[in-house]
Image (spheres, rainbow, N blue to C red):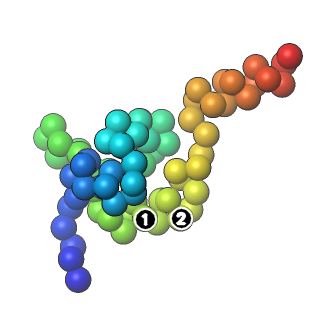
Amino acid sequence: MEDRWLSVDEIADHLGIKRDTVYKWIGERQMPGHKIGRLWKFNKQEVDNWVRSGGANTPGPEIEASEAEKRES
């Protein structure tokens, strides 16, 4: 069983998303990652559990704001 830390590029490839989305999800959706110096590293199982629990589906602040605007109009 492989138990190593993945880079931003590797976790993005694993999830089928862009690296910019990884950085966005770290800040806006509390994607589990660990900053080691200047680098972000990810445990594949932590990220997979986060995705399965709906973390990737949680609306970000920009979505929540636009939904509130729709309700007001």
| Spatial CA span between label 1 and label 2 | 6 Å
Q: Could you tell me if the residues under marks 1 and 2 are in contact, i.e. CB atoms within 8 Å?
A: yes
Label 1 Cα crowd, 10 Å radius (few <14 / some 14-19 / many 20+): some
Left or right: residue 60 compared with residue 65? left
Q: Give coordinates of residue 27: x percent, y percent.
A: 41, 36
Residue 45 sits above or below residue 38 on the image = below
Left or right: residue 59 compared with residue 12? right
Label 2 Cα crowd, 10 Å radius (few <14 / some 14-19 / many 20+): few
Q: Which residue type does callout 2 highlight?
A: Arg
Q: Give coordinates of residue 45: x percent, y percent.
A: 36, 68
Residue 44 sits above or below residue 33 on the image = below
Give the quarter of the figure containing the N terminus: bottom left
Q: Give coordinates of residue 38: x percent, y percent.
A: 15, 37
Q: Which residue type does callout 1 highlight?
A: Asp
Left or right: residue 39 compared with residue 46? left
Residue 70 sits above or below residue 31 on the image = above
Task: Identify the residue at horizontal 46%, vertical 66% (top origin).
Answer: 49
Q: Which mark is residue 52?
A: 2
Left or right: residue 20 compared with residue 61? left
Label 2: which secondary element = helix
> Splitting the image into 4 quarters, where does residue 16 fall?
bottom left
Task: In this rendered view, identify the residue nearer to me: 61 or 22.
Answer: 22
Q: Which mark is residue 48?
A: 1
Label 1: which secondary element = helix
> Splitting the image into 4 quarters, where does residue 18 fall?
top left
Task: Identify the residue at horizontal 53%, vertical 52% (top origin).
Answer: 55
Task: Identify the residue at horizontal 59%, vertical 46% (top origin).
Answer: 58
